[in-house]
């Protein structure tokens, strides 16, 4: 067995570290009560990555076939940018609502 008896612990630890890093590089997320009621959460659960792929196709100038040719790193980086952009747009809209 490669890596000895501690191999599994190292692997689980690394996966946890990587997932934690990715979460810390994304804006706060989650569905509002209204979004859950409308069904957004179920849509994401039902279609998984395909839902993300269609979303990226909608918000970028790239077609699905082009997006699928990107490296995982490139796809995640662009998705992270779009997520932060959406987060700041939402915050800006809330600020502007309060000013009215």
Image (spheres, rainbow, N blue to C red):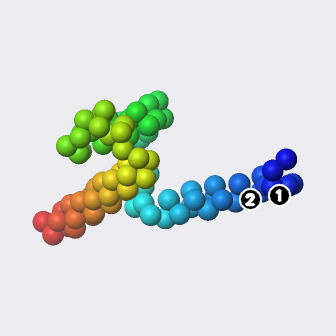
What is the crowding at mark 1: few (fewer than 14 residues within 10 Å), some, or many (at least 20)? few
Secondary structure beneath disc 1? loop
Q: Which corner quadrant holds the C terminus? A: bottom left
Q: Residue at x 25, y 35 (%)?
A: 63
Q: Is residue 5 above or below residue 61?
A: below
What is the crowding at mark 2: few (fewer than 14 residues within 10 Å), some, or many (at least 20)? few
Q: Position of residue 80 (x, y in %)?
A: 37, 56
Q: Position of residue 84 (x, y in %)?
A: 33, 60
Q: Position of residue 98 (x, y in %)?
A: 20, 67
Q: Nearer the viewer, residue 77 or 85?
A: 77
| Observer able to see residue 7 | yes
For residue 52, which quarter of the picture?
top left
For residue 36, which quarter of the picture?
top left
Q: Which residue is mark 2?
A: 10
Q: Which residue is mark 1?
A: 6
Q: Nearer the viewer, residue 47 or 60?
A: 60
Would residue 57 appear left or right of 15 to someone viewing this image? Answer: left
Secondary structure beneath disc 2? helix
Q: Nearer the viewer, residue 27 or 78?
A: 78
Q: Residue at x 46, y 35 (%)?
A: 48
Q: Position of residue 24 (x, y in %)?
A: 49, 64
Between marks 2 and 1, how big is the CA–CA gap? 6 Å
Would residue 76 appear left or right of 98 to someone viewing this image? Answer: right
């Amino acid at each position: 067995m490669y890596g000895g008896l501690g191999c599994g612990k190292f692997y689980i630890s690394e996966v946890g570290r990587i997932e934690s890093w990715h979460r810390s590089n994304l804006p706060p997320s989650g569905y509002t009560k209204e979004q859950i009621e409308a069904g957004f959460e179920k849509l994401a659960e039902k279609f998984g990555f395909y839902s993300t792929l269609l979303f990226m196709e909608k918000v970028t100038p790239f077609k699905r076939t082009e997006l699928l040719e990107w490296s995982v790193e490139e796809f995640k980086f662009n998705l992270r940018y779009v997520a932060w952009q959406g987060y700041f747009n939402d915050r800006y809209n809330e600020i502007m609502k309060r000013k009215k």
